[in-house]
Image (spheres, helix red, strand yellow):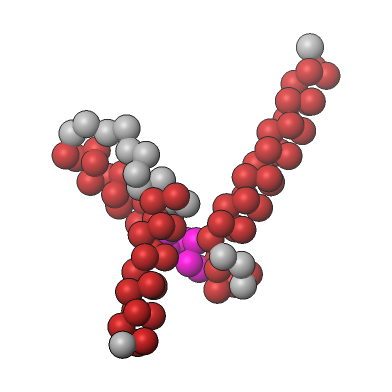
Amino acid sequence: MYEVYQKRWQIEIFHKSIKQNASLSKSPTRTIRTQSNHLFASLIAYCKLELLKVKTSLNHFAIKQKLLLKANVLMFNELQILKGAT
């Protein structure tokens, strides 16, 4: 019984991560083609998160947080450069 629960829990973790970290549930698409593309892109994003998880020993939420922080720092630096250019 415990083994079944463990397998089920891994599926729940997959669903939660692909919805929240790979933006599967936030699809703004309307046509079948764009929905298929969004699904494929979400699966690719999940796979990349899995690779980063193995490399860094961090979970998907921590990886996403680090990526967002890095992107915000880069954006702020670029904004400062643009302000200085005017």
Quadrant of the rendering where the N terminus is positioned: bottom left
Give the camera-side residue of 9 and 29: 9
In the displayed orientation, state which residue is furthest to the right.
84
Q: Is residue 41 left or right of residue 86?
A: left
Task: Measuring from the top left, give residue 42's x and y in whole percent.
Answer: 37, 51
Q: Is residue 8 left or right of residue 20?
A: left
Q: Going 18% across and 34% down the picture, which residue do you hit? A: 31
Task: Measuring from the top left, give residue 33's x and y in whole percent.
Answer: 19, 40
Q: Is residue 86 left or right of residue 15?
A: right
Task: Measuring from the top left, give residue 17's x and y in whole percent.
Answer: 44, 58
In the image, the segment drawn in magenta is 45-51
Label the magenta part by its dominant secondary structure.
helix
Q: Going 69% across and 46% down the picture, which residue do you hit? A: 70
In the displayed orientation, state which residue is furthest to the left.
32
Does residue 44 show up? no
In the displayed orientation, state which residue is furthest to the top.
86
Q: Is residue 57 left or right of residue 30?
A: right
Does residue 59 show up? yes
Q: How many numbered marks have been drawn onto this rendered protein structure?
A: 0
Task: Measuring from the top left, give residue 51's x and y in whole percent.
Answer: 50, 68
Above/below status of 28 relative to 23: above
Indicate yes or no whether the magenta region holds residue 55: no
In the displayed orientation, state which residue is furthest to the front.
1
Above/below status of 23 relative to 16: above
Q: Going 29% across and 49% down the picture, which residue do you hit? A: 39
Question: Residue 37: which quarter of the image?
Answer: top left
Quadrant of the rendering where the C terminus is positioned: top right
